[in-house]
Structures are given as C-alpha cells and as structure tokens.
Amino acid sequence: MKAMILAAGRGERMRPLTDACPKPLLRVRGKALIEWHLERLARGGVREVVINTAWLEEQIVAALGDGARFGLAIRYSLEGRDHGGALETAGGLKKALPLLALAADEPFWYVAADVFAPGFDFGATAAGAIRPGQLGHLWMVANPPQHPGGDFGIADDGLAVAGRPGASFTWSGIGIFRPGFVTELMGDFEAGAKARLRPYLDAAIAQRRLGATRWTGDWADVGTPQRLRALDAAFQRFFQKTGGY
C-alpha cells in the first residue's frame, strides 16, 4: 500500500512553537512527529508516501528529503507554493490523489501528521480491514478530554455510524481510503479548492460504506504546547522503563 500524510496545517493552537517550525517537525523523544509515522509506515511495508505541505513547507521538504533514509519514496503536494496556503483535509486529499498514482480500487493509508501513535501497525493485517465495496475504514480511540463528544460510533457489524452520547469514539486521524472516496463523493468542488473531510465521512456513513475499528494502543492528539510537553514527559518515563517501541 501507499500512504498520504497530512502535514499542511498552520498549527495555530501550537503557537508560539509553530511560528518558526511546522507542526509535523515538532519533536517527541527527540524525533519529529512525522518521522514516527514514516518509520512505522516503512516497517508495515509501505514504500511510497505523499506528504501535503503548506505552512513553512520548505522546512518539511528539507528535513525529510526523498525519504530514502526511511526506506521510502516521498513525493510532496505543495499547497503553499501552488495555492498560497493549506487546502484543509479534503481539499488536500483531492489535490494529492494523482500523486499517489493508484490503481482504480487500490486502498491507501491516510495519516494525520499531528497525532502520535507510535505502536500502530501499518502492516497487512490492518490494511486488510477495509472490506470489498467500502470506501474507507477508520481507527477510533477513546474520547480525549479535549474532545469528550467524540466523532463516530462503531456498529456491531463493524460499520462506522453517526456518533451519539455514550456510544461515540474519536477518530484517531488514521484510516484507509479507496480512490472512490474522492472520485465518488468529492465531485462538488474542484481540485485546489479548500474543503473539510467531515462532510464526506458523513456521506460514506450514510451509504454504509465506511468501516471502523477500535484502537486501544498509545495515542495522543498533539494539539497544544501543554499536550506536547505532557506527552514528551510521559514517554520519557515509558522509554526509561521499557526501552521503547
């Protein structure tokens, strides 16, 4: 499988840290957030990755290069250069899809650069979670304090469903999509336009074509400097105790 990593956001809530450093290059345990993903993707057998960029995008390109040191081939969707800023989650995906050069029904990983899931397995078992006829599959986590209402529920048949109090989880920012998620659902805007992903996830749920799985491993949404410091301190203790992943 191939993968797309979303790394274009400005990271307003992370200021002042992101005034001079793009959010995906902020470090946990001495390693940039996006590097944790790249290493896990390579370990899972992924060899080609597209990264979308906008804010301080030249730093991301300079830091990661062609991906060879990770055992990957990296291509970049340069939203800052081409459009003057980030296209948001759906807009970025639509612009980047041609760079993935996928076969008609070939699924691909979709990963948010600003989440931390160092133990996630991008191997064949996880990749097989998406069923024939589905447009996507999401990995869900317990609702964090900053998002108590969650995003979606998980039905007994493994489909994602509209969230409701007491039966909702938060999307981890990790998923698998087929090209049809873009080509079938995102026809209402042109490539290069800004658009958010949530309405298209809701549309796939309404069609019963979006699966979901609970992820119980270590995970964090690195959304503020306070959360970043807490995460780094927590994993400092974890690595000292266990030796890490």
Image (cartoon, rainbow, N blue to C red):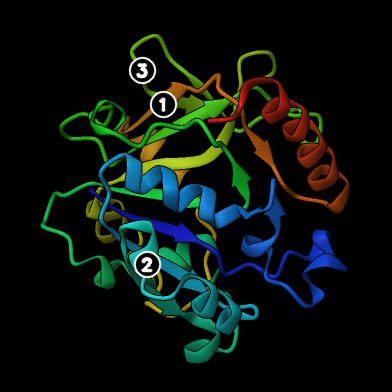
Q: Are marks 1 and 3 in contact (CB under 8 Å)?
A: yes
Task: Examine the image and state in which quarter residue 21 appears.
Answer: bottom right
| Residue appearing at x 33%, y 48% in the figure | 42
Within-10-Å neighbours for mark 1: few <14, some 14–19, many 20+: many
Side of 51 relative to 26 (left or right): left
Report whether residue 119 is seen.
yes
What residue would you read off at disc 1? 212
Type of amino acid under label 2? Gly
Type of amino acid under label 3? Gly
Task: Examine the image and state in which quarter residue 169 appears.
Answer: top right
Q: Position of residue 84 (x, y in %)?
A: 58, 89
Q: Position of residue 236 (x, y in %)?
A: 76, 35
Report whether residue 199 is seen.
no
Point out the tag, 1 or 3, that comes first from the N-terminus: 3
Task: Examine the image and state in which quarter residue 126 appears.
Answer: top left
What residue would you read off at disc 3? 158
Residue in the foreground of this view, choosing between 4 and 161: 4
Residue in the foreground of this view, choosing between 2 and 36: 36
What residue would you read off at disc 2? 67
Q: Position of residue 227 (x, y in %)?
A: 82, 43
Side of 136 relative to 106 (left or right): right
Q: Position of residue 206 (x, y in %)?
A: 39, 35
Looking at the image, residue 68 lies above or below residue 145: below
